């Protein structure tokens, strides 16, 4: 028998900003239970909200301003950052071995994950930009120059055509 673990599903919902039509009956806000008489309202979780009422339960940010999605878990409505901080998976950087928080942007090379600042050639420390060519050799990130120099030292230079 194979052992497994139960996992909660990721509950992501979209947020829509709608303009209130003047000739329609005002909708009730799911946050404060008052009528929405503003020019705009938010629709999320199949409910209607004042822009000020749809907030992250942790940081209190207005979810309509920080993106078009919200996250729910354990009866909490959360922004992406707080959802990942509370329930996301963390890992270690392949270069410095320090912890990478779940909400932090990362760079990936095969199965390795790196802090943005650590994603650099491990011989000359040249940082890479989006679209730059890099090489992964023996789990080391190398720039093209250091990779080719290493190949020449090993006795088999890359073919130049």
Image: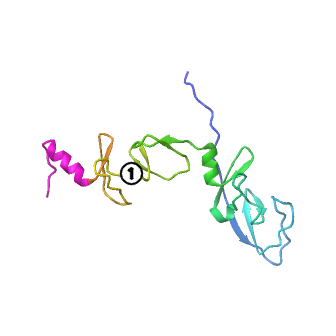
Q: Is residue 115 magenta?
A: no
Q: Is residue 30 left or right of residue 67?
A: right
Q: Give the x, y percent position of residue 52.
A: 76, 65
Crowding at mark 1 (Cα within 10 Å: few <14, some 14-19, many 20+): many
Check disc 1 and report its element: helix, strand or loop: loop
| Residue at horizontal 64 percent and vertical 44 percent from the top | 86
Question: Which scheme is used to colour this image of the protein?
Answer: rainbow
Residue 96 lies, with reference to residue 159, above or below; the image says above
- Residue with the most extreme top position: 1
Q: Quadrant of the C terminus?
A: bottom left
Q: Is residue 95 left or right of residue 145?
A: right
Q: Quadrant of the N terminus?
A: top right
Q: How many marks?
A: 1
Instruction: Identify the residue position indicated by label 1 in the image.
Output: 119
Q: Is residue 150 magenta?
A: yes
Asked whether 110 or 151 is in front, the reply is 151
| Residue at horizontal 28 percent and vertical 48 percent from the top | 123
Q: Is residue 102 left or right of residue 131?
A: right
- What stretch of residues is rendered in magenta? 144-161
Residue 45 lies, with reference to residue 87, above or below; the image says below
Q: Give the x, y percent position of residue 118.
A: 40, 49
**Which quarter of the picture shows residue 126?**
bottom left
| Residue at horizontal 20 percent and vertical 50 percent from the top | 148
| Residue at horizontal 61 percent and vertical 53 percent from the top | 81
């Amino acid at each position: 028998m194979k052992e497994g673990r139960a996992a909660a599903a990721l509950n992501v919902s979209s947020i829509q900003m709608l303009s209130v039509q003047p000739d329609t009956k005002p909708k009730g806000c799911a946050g404060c239970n008052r009528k929405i008489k503003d020019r705009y309202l938010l629709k999320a979780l199949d409910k209607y909200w004042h822009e000020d009422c749809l907030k992250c339960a942790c940081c209190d940010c207005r979810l309509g301003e920080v993106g078009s999605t919200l996250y729910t878990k354990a009866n909490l409505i959360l922004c992406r950052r707080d959802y990942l901080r509370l329930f996301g998976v963390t890992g270690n950087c392949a270069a410095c071995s320090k912890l990478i928080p779940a909400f932090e942007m990362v760079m990936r090379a095969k199965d390795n994950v790196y802090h943005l600042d650590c994603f650099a050639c491990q011989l000359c420390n040249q940082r890479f930009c989006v679209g730059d060519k890099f090489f992964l050799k023996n789990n080391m990130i190398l720039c093209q120059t250091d990779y080719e120099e290493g190949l020449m030292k090993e006795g088999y230079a890359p073919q130049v055509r």
